[in-house]
């Protein structure tokens, strides 16, 4: 396994700047999740590391080696894409064996069998090993394509939204499995998603990307509890953080323009009046949509609250974040 | 606007029964969710309510009138499909006016009506734009406008937000619900997304394999599922199931398995044999003094809360706890369950046993 480093990488596609002077280090043995909406530069970053695209400027290092002149095949990376790509004429077993059967590797058949068996078990496809790849459901095909990466022992795994085509139950299972495989094998994994649950639950480090720039890099907890700007604060947390004019509440620091209040960081029972506009019972908790000085605010309360729409409650900030006019965190 | 009542509705397609026997009532002005996995019969049910399919058996009443065999055109409902279906060669105003024009409404009246609708939807400024250049959100508002403009008795929507990405979806679902709250139009909405159903619905029907599993308000269904299917389909992570062999007697206030005894709400019916102890992740506490033990196999950080997965002798258990509780993979700990929240299921047919806690909810279903 190896460290991956990008230094001052820029990449444009015509007019569009996909990556803008991106510098980032994926530590050896870490599980790094790149998080951001469509167009943030997540997939482009992955393609730079894999060698499928070349930077306009800057360099990519894997295990300290400059990758500039190396082809994807020479880089010793294993990729999993959102769209599974299997060999349709081969069985599941043959698909999984394929990366190990490369003549250069000379892997003994017994080792191959063992490895394929293990991976199939983890991905819950043991019973389908002798099926043709084309006879699988979409979810099963995706598990095979993840499996094909896992049978190898590359310097780094690169994964681009590998779970997004799976149903909720399987996604929840595989989140735990991927995390476990990565943690126990010590693999370096660079993973792209726009799903914040995946980022929070699996990552050792999250890289928050916006318009080709790295905004923040840290553990999920650091990013959740200590965001560097408004954008980063809005990436993690459901319901999303409330961003409001700072002067709506008393006690703002000078030059604070915006206040960021996570829904669970609004104290109820003291403070100023807010009107409950709508109540959503989600089962384990209840969301309150509030009208506060003509601003819309979401907070959460216990599941069996007796509040109903039209009620007035008193609220005040608890652990607010303050941002300046440019959106940078100042307190 | 209208009340809609479904009684013993069945639909066969050849040998395949899509809907076995559905009964439920959509009250006037409700936002009503038909929820279930793909193939459960929810879309077929909606299509029968709309008149796009005719039921094999059973009755459908709209405002007391039996309409089961009437075609869609005579039911005065508006069906909103995946919302992006607009007439591409017409501008926004013409798209919204179209249903009124085809009804023969005078031009002045159309103009006024379209103006009102545009106001409600916040699209007054774009009325004279071609639909080609509109953002996804505006296209969706126009499609809605076209459905609303006729003042139909009810709106039927089939996964209208299904094709959208998560962020936009959340925004549009709030907007749709707010629109409903302004207009109070009876709305029946099909989805496979349990969170969307909980979030938007006044009431939910949960379907599986063509059968209505449960019908009621979201919180009651979440708290007191009628079947294991509902308990697992609603909630994320789903309800924990601890399978055991034993007896849950009528009048019992506890059950025993795994060398421990657990308090439960007083049972109103008894069952012995294969049973399941059901408890939601947020109703379990890590408690070193508890007899029932588990070993932590995964910890998932979620911001203020975390999901802790444990292996126990009765299976895997997931616990939701505050993320300030420091726990480590490999730790062994006891687990205690909030006795007021437990449901006991007959594991053979998946039905919840009636107890003092869930009886009221199950009677309504």
Image (cartoon, coloured by chain):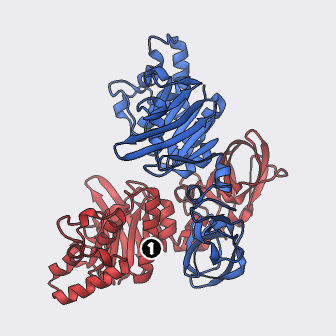
Chain colours: A blue, B red
Label 1 element class:
helix
Q: In x, y percent, where is residue B154?
A: 33, 78
Q: Residue at x 56, y 62 (%)?
A: A326
Q: Which residue is mark 1?
A: B177
- Res B338 quadrant in image: bottom right
Residue B212 as seen in the image, left or right of residue B333: left
Q: In x, y percent, where is residue A219?
A: 66, 46
Q: Is residue B62 visible?
A: no
Seen from the viewer's position, the closer of residues B339 and B233 is B233
Seen from the viewer's position, the closer of residues B30 and A45 is A45
Q: In x, y percent, where is residue B45?
A: 34, 65
- Res B176 quadrant in image: bottom left
Q: Is residue A312 visible?
A: yes
* Residue, far right: B289
The chain letter under disc 1 is B
- Res B104 quadrant in image: bottom left
Q: Residue at x 55, y 19 (%)?
A: A114
Seen from the viewer's position, the closer of residues A128 and B180 is B180
């Amino acid at each position: 396994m190896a460290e991956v480093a990008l230094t001052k990488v820029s990449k444009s596609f015509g007019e569009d700047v996909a990556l803008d002077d991106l510098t980032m280090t994926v530590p050896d043995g870490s599980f790094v999740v790149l998080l951001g909406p469509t167009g943030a530069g997540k997939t482009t970053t992955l393609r730079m590391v894999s060698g499928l695209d070349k930077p306009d400027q800057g360099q990519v290092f894997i295990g300290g080696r400059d990758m500039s002149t190396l082809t994807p095949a020479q880089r010793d990376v294993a990729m999993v894409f959102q769209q599974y790509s299997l060999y349709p004429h081969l069985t599941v077993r043959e698909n999984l064996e394929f990366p190990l059967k490369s003549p250069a590797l000379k892997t003994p058949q017994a080792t191959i069998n063992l490895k394929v068996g293990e991976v199939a078990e983890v991905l819950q496809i043991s019973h389908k090993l002798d099926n043709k790849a084309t006879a699988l459901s979409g979810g099963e095909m995706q598990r095979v394509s993840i499996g094909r990466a896992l049978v190898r022992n590359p310097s780094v795994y690169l994964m681009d939204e590998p779970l997004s085509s799976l149903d909720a139950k399987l996604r929840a299972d595989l989140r735990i499995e991927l995390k476990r495989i990565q943690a126990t094998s010590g693999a370096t994994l660079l993973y792209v998603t726009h799903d914040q649950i995946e980022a929070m639950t699996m990552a050792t480090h999250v890289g928050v990307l916006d318009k080709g720039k790295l905004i923040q890099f840290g553990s999920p907890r650091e990013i959740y509890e200590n965001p560097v700007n408004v954008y980063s604060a809005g990436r993690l947390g459901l319901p999303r953080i409330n961003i409001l004019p700072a002067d709506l509440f008393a006690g703002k620091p000078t030059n604070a323009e915006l206040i960021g209040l996570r829904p669970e960081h609004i104290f109820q029972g003291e403070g100023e009046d807010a009107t409950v506009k709508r109540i959503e019972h989600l089962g384990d908790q209840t969301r309150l949509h509030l009208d506060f000085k003509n601003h819309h605010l979401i907070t959460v309360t216990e599941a069996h609250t007796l509040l109903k729409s039209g009620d007035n409650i008193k609220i005040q900030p608890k652990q607010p974040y303050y941002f300046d006019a440019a959106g940078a965190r100042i307190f | 606007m209208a009340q809609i009542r479904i009684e013993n509705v069945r639909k066969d397609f050849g040998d395949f029964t899509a809907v076995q026997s559905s009964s439920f009532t959509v009250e006037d002005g409700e936002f009503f969710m038909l929820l279930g996995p793909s193939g459960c019969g929810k879309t077929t049910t909606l299509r029968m309510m709309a008149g796009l399919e005719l039921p094999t058996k059973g009755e459908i009443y709209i405002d007391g009138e039996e309409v089961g065999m009437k075609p869609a055109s005579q039911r005065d409902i508006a069906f909103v499909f995946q919302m992006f279906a607009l007439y591409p060669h017409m501008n926004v105003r013409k798209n919204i006016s179209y249903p009124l024009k085809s009804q023969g409404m005078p031009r002045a009246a159309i103009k006024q009506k379209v103006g009102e609708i545009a106001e409600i939807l916040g699209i007054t400024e774009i009325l004279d734009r071609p639909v080609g250049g509109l953002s996804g959100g505006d296209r969706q508002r126009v499609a809605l406008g076209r459905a609303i403009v006729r003042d139909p008795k009810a709106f039927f929507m089939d996964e209208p937000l299904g094709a959208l990405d998560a962020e936009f979806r959340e925004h549009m679902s709030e907007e749709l619900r707010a629109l409903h709250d302004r207009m109070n139009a009876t709305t029946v909405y099909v989805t496979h997304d349990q969170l969307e159903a909980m979030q938007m619905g006044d009431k939910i029907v949960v379907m599986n394999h063509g059968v209505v599993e449960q019908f009621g308000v979201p919180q009651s269904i979440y708290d007191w599922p009628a079947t294991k299917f509902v308990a697992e389909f609603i909630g994320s992570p789903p309800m924990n199931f601890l399978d055991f062999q034993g007896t849950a007697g009528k009048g019992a206030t506890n059950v025993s398995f795994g060398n421990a005894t657990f308090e439960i709400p007083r049972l109103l019916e008894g069952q012995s044999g294969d049973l399941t102890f059901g408890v939601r992740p947020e109703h379990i506490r890590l408690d070193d003094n508890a007899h029932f033990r588990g070993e932590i196999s995964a910890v998932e950080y979620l911001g203020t809360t975390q999901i802790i997965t444990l292996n126990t002798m009765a299976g895997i258990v997931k616990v939701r706890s505050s993320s300030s509780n420091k726990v480590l993979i490999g730790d062994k700990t006891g687990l205690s369950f909030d006795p007021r929240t437990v449901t006991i299921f007959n594991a053979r047919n998946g039905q919840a046993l009636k107890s003092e806690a869930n009886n009221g909810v199950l009677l309504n279903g």
